[in-house]
Amino acid sequence: MPDSASHPSLSFTDVQDAQKRIASTIARTPTISNVALSRLTEAEIIIKLENLQAIGSFKERGAANRMALLTQEERKHGVITVSAGNHAQGVGRQASLLGIQATIVMPRFTPATKVAATKSWGARVVLAGDNFDEAVQTAEKIRHEEGQTLVHPFNDPAVIAGQGTCALEMIEDAPPLDAIVVPIGGGGLMAGFVTVLKQLSPNTKLYGVQVEGYSPLGAYPAPLRSVPGGPTIAEGIAVVQPGNHCLDVIGKHIDGVFVVNELQVEGAITTLAEKARQVGEGAGAAPLAAILAHHDLFKGKRVGFPISGGNINARILAHVILRSLLREGRILRLIFQIPDRPGLLAAISEKIGSYGGNIIEVSHHRLFAAPSVQTAELVVMIEARDTEHALEIERELSRHYHVERD
């Protein structure tokens, strides 16, 4: 997808100008200290709540700035972009506010909820291709035929300047920070942070975070490396090749790039929901995953990060939380082999309750799962207060019944 650069370079003044330009349509989201996360990490944690934007993501900042710079002729022909996520909604909303037509090309297998959310802003959605690259080919064909202006998701200095307003607000609103951790996909948000910190807070350490399958900067400051790609909970930063404009701005100005795995991101999503009472998508939770994984580096420091987006499917969020609780041992799945006689299920339930466990799900099998026709298999999922409480419940039940942990 060709670049849509509107300026040959990027300066701090560009970010300041962008802040004024987009102020009427973009929320100045809160930058707050979070006590629960601070206690957990043994650092003072400051979070920037970009999940509270109208579209639930910082992405609209860049779209708003780029589209505010459109000429009257460009507005007449409309805009086009390729996106399966937050950028699509940002372009769609800004187009609706400007009264212009937006065409969003999305891969065919984009989740229906994201397609519906983009259409809700009045955008024309074209589903094409099995992946991002194939969707780009369709977008180029449409742009050639219809003459729209491309609004690139990240590789445009005007878009980067818009993303930089997130950093500008954070530095203006937060106490002096020792370090900031920023997710890196295409690199637009990080490039914005670099531009602002160089000017306003040069002593603040700046770290990036990427997820394992999409970590081309994982060897930073060494050259980009090839990555395997694949499914990820952090689809917002699932980018194989960061933008060249973004890389030019980032240069050697960051202090390192952390690479986190899928389970670490899932755990961070759960921690944000449970401890901070914030919904974060995978990319938005990735900085917390990095902070938790590098506890000693950040202990005792004042550390900030943006929750860059909160657009996670409710079903996936529920599954992530349950998976995290299972891994932590706070949810037990116990298999009982019990005599098949009346009243035993009630007796087991009463014992679990007396030990302080909360029964979430019960499955009772008499016919085929049990080893004998005289026995039954009972599968019980139990919620405990913490790992030690879960072990206590299992030990107590094992004194009375044949129990195995699934």
Image: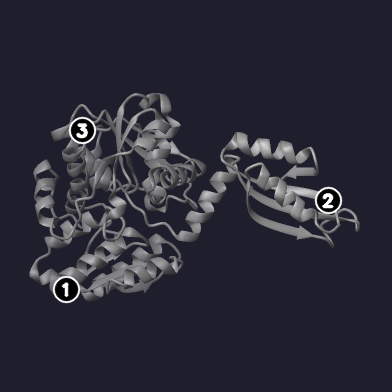
For the residues labelled 3 and 2, the Cα–Cα distance comes to 60 Å
Local packing at callout 3 (Cα closer than 10 Å; few below 14, some 14-19, many 20+) is some
Q: Quadrant of residue 293?
A: top left
Write down the residue under mark 1: 99
Task: Say which element carries label 2.
Answer: strand
Q: Measuring 21% from the left and 74% from the top, which residue is drawn there?
A: 101
Secondary structure under badge 1? loop
Residue at (17, 33) in percent of width and height = 198
Q: Please determine whether, in this image, residue 131 is positioned above or below residue 119.
A: above
* Local crowd size for mark 1, using a 10 Å CA cut-off: few (<14), some (14–19), many (≥20): few
SS of the residue under disc 3 = loop
Q: CA distance from mark 3 to mark 1?
A: 39 Å
x, y percentage for residue 138? 34, 69
| Mark number, residue 175 | 3
Which amino acid is tagged 1? Gly
The residue drawn where x is 26% and y is 60% is 54
Q: Amino acid at mark 3?
A: Pro
